[in-house]
Image (cartoon, rainbow, N blue to C red):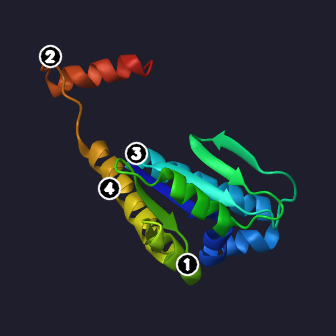
């Protein structure tokens, strides 16, 4: 199974749309990232874990599930990087390939050493954009397909039925 661990605040700081939301309200930026990653998880089937450090949310470590994602807020004295490194160590095995989404160069080097692969914020954004494009194309193609009728009728009869259906 592929597992994607996302450095939440690093991605928020790297994506323009989330950065703008962060300027207004950090909670909105977090929610938007969660929404995007939920769509990613549904589309790819990968397990997704988002890690937010306690810099913006003080308190004890908390883990929750939302939109089928695992969301972790670290302990007050723990950085997201430390939490991600701990997660990678626990998740990496023969059955799991772990990817970490971050643009933090030092963190990328550390997770490489633990056997995980990295996805930069830019690469993840491109992957999400491509995914959205595929979904839009699929919807457009689906709209173009005419439904198959089991009974073949003349156009005149179809018009009469359509008028009846609309109450004319």
Asked if the residue at tag 3 contacts the one at tag 1, i.e. Cβ–Cβ closer than 8 Å, the answer is no
Secondary element type, mark 2: loop
Q: Is residue 70 above or below residue 74?
A: above
Q: Residue at x 48, y 76 (%)?
A: 122
Q: Is residue 119 above or below residue 159?
A: below
Provide the residue designation for mark 4: 137
Q: Residue at x 70, y 45 (%)?
A: 63
Q: Residue at x 43, y 22 (%)?
A: 166
Mark closest to the chain's N terminus, 1 or 4: 1
Provide the residue designation for mark 2: 151
Query: Residue 102 location, x and y as percent?
Result: 55, 72
Instruction: Specify whether 5 is left or right of 119.
Output: right
Provide the residue designation for mark 3: 45
Residue 164 placement: quadrant: top left
Q: Residue at x 65, y 70 (%)?
A: 12
Residue 103 circle label: 1
Secondary element type, mark 3: loop
Residue 36 placement: quadrant: bottom right
């Amino acid at each position: 199974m592929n597992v994607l661990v996302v450095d939440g605040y690093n991605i928020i700081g790297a994506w323009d749309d989330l950065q703008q939301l962060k300027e207004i309200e950090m909670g909105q930026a977090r929610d938007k990232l969660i929404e995007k990653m939920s769509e990613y998880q549904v589309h790819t089937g990968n397990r997704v874990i988002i890690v937010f450090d306690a810099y913006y949310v003080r308190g004890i470590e908390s883990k929750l599930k939302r939109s089928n994602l695992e969301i972790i807020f670290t302990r007050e004295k723990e950085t997201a990087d430390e939490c991600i490194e701990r997660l990678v160590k626990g998740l990496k095995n023969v059955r799991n390939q772990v990817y970490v989404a971050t643009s933090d160069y030092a963190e990328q080097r550390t997770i490489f050493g633990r056997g995980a692969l990295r996805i930069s914020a830019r690469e993840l954004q491109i992957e999400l954009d491509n995914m959205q494009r595929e979904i839009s194309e699929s919807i457009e193609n689906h709209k173009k397909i005419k439904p198959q009728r089991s009974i073949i009728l003349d156009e005149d009869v179809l018009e009469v039925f359509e008028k009846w259906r609309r109450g004319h």
